[in-house]
Amino acid sequence: MKLLVTGGCGFIGSHFVREILATRAKWRVVNVDGLTYAGRGRNLDDLARHPRYRFVRADIAGAAMAPILARERPDAIVNFAAESHVDRSIHGAAPFLRTNALGVQNLLDAARGGRFLQVSTDEVYGSIPGRRRAREDAPLRPSSAYSASKAAADLLVLAARHTHGQDVVITRCTNNYGPWQFPEKLIPLMITNALVGHPLPVYGDGLQRRDWIHARDHCRGVLAALERGRPGEIYNFGAGIEPPNLVIVRNILRLLGKPTSLIRHVADRLGHDRRYAVDTAKARRELGWRPRIGLADGLAETVRWYRDHPAWWLRLKDAAFRAYYRRNYGGGALR
Ligand code: NAD
Ligand code: TYD
């Protein structure tokens, strides 16, 4: 099996590439990544000389994709490449539409047979009120440019199935956490701020709920959908727990032995979705998938990883954070 993974230098894609190489002894992986701000070749440094791994730098929305796919002729494509942060999409939607929608159509057009797995998100269902959980046939009600561009991609993927009979599968997962996540998302942002005693910005009342799943559990789901999913089907993944953001933030502070006085309630995100929740019965029934990593263990592992890898994340923080770090720690290593 020759698998072409896009976005393999990003947070979840890098976990996926590692999972494949570790558990599928005969598979080869070609990782196509454009290396945006979020994609770090270094995330996969340890694989540089792996005999079954190859990296190709390319933009999934660019003209190079057709010749790359014609040359590589992969047996399957798994598309992780995306602009992935809601806050950035509020300030500028264009790269989201380009990569997440046009890029997906470009990949579909260039793909020559084989399975196409689109890694989507539960955010396409929009905010879910009460205790309901969205099933795969729930209406699409995206409420940010990020989730709207991901919903557009899902519709383009389903259209390719309808029009050309392409073998496609879509997965929709809840919020991921774990090592290697860019420190702009809630969990790594709070851990890294707390590590140096910088304030922790909680949007609004902090009572918004997300269903946090470890990236490795998500990746096992994507692999199960790739191997066992039915063509044209959609599969939800989630851990089924939905703590409010404030609980996550307090747990991070507790794990690091830092005071809750670091928490700052700041202006709410525009159009902030209150709650995401999905029904994962289909994935459990059809794919035999279930999450294995509990939030307490996963969060503790993640906190340890960021504590032990300051060199990885310090240079990824924004200018204000770096100025704070210089003021308090000079040029020295993290204490
Ligand atoms: P990420 O931002 O960490 O990584 C994205 C990767 O895509 C980076 O390596 C980047 O360089 C690459 N990329 C971006 N634009 C590209 C382009 N035009 N051409 C080629 N490569 C490009 O994202 P992530 O958190 O790892 O998310 C991966 C996928 O999973 C995304 O499709 C996202 O929508 C989906 N998803 C993420 C979450 C989450 O909680 N992070 C949850 C559900 C689904
Ligand atoms: P995020 O990690 O950006 O993921 P998403 O918006 O895709 O769910 O945010 C998770 C939750 O944390 C969301 O409710 C917004 C909130 N949040 C904060 O309160 N402060 C922050 O600095 C960030 C980045 C997020």
Image: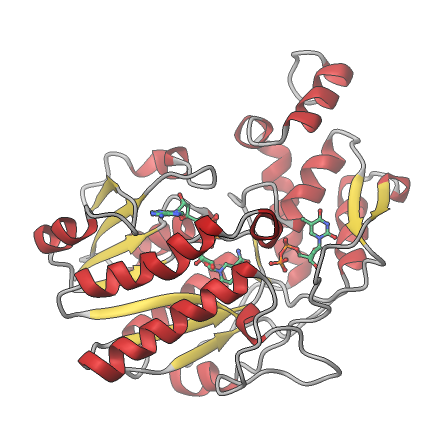
Q: Residue furthest left?
A: 71
Name the image quarter holding residue 292.
bottom right
Residue 251, how many percent across, how many down?
78, 52
- The colour style of the image is secondary structure
Q: Residue at x 59, y 62 (%)?
A: 144
Name the image quarter holding residue 208.
bottom right
Q: Residue at x 88, y 44 (%)?
A: 260
Q: Residue at x 61, y 52 (%)?
A: 90
| Ligand 2 rendered quadrant | bottom right
Residue 298, how many percent across, how many down?
61, 55
Q: How many marks?
A: 0
In the rendered view, does 80 fall on the left or right side of 86? Answer: left
Name the foreground residue: 198 vs 307: 198
Q: Quadrant of the C terminus?
A: top right
Q: Quadrant of the N terminus?
A: bottom left
Q: Answer whether residue 81 is visible to the viewer in this image.
A: no
In the rendered view, does 1 fall on the left or right side of 146? Answer: left
Q: Residue furthest top?
A: 331
Does residue 32 sit above or below 25 in this rendering?
above
Residue 69, how many percent across, how many down?
15, 54
Q: Answer whether residue 119 is visible to the viewer in this image.
A: yes
Name the foreground residue: 229 vs 273: 273
Residue 184, how many percent across, how many down?
61, 43
Q: Residue furthest right?
A: 261
Does residue 45 sit above or below 81 in this rendering?
above
In the rendered view, does 271 fall on the left or right side of 149? Answer: right
Q: Residue at x 46, y 70 (%)?
A: 151
Does residue 212 sit above or below 267 in this rendering?
below
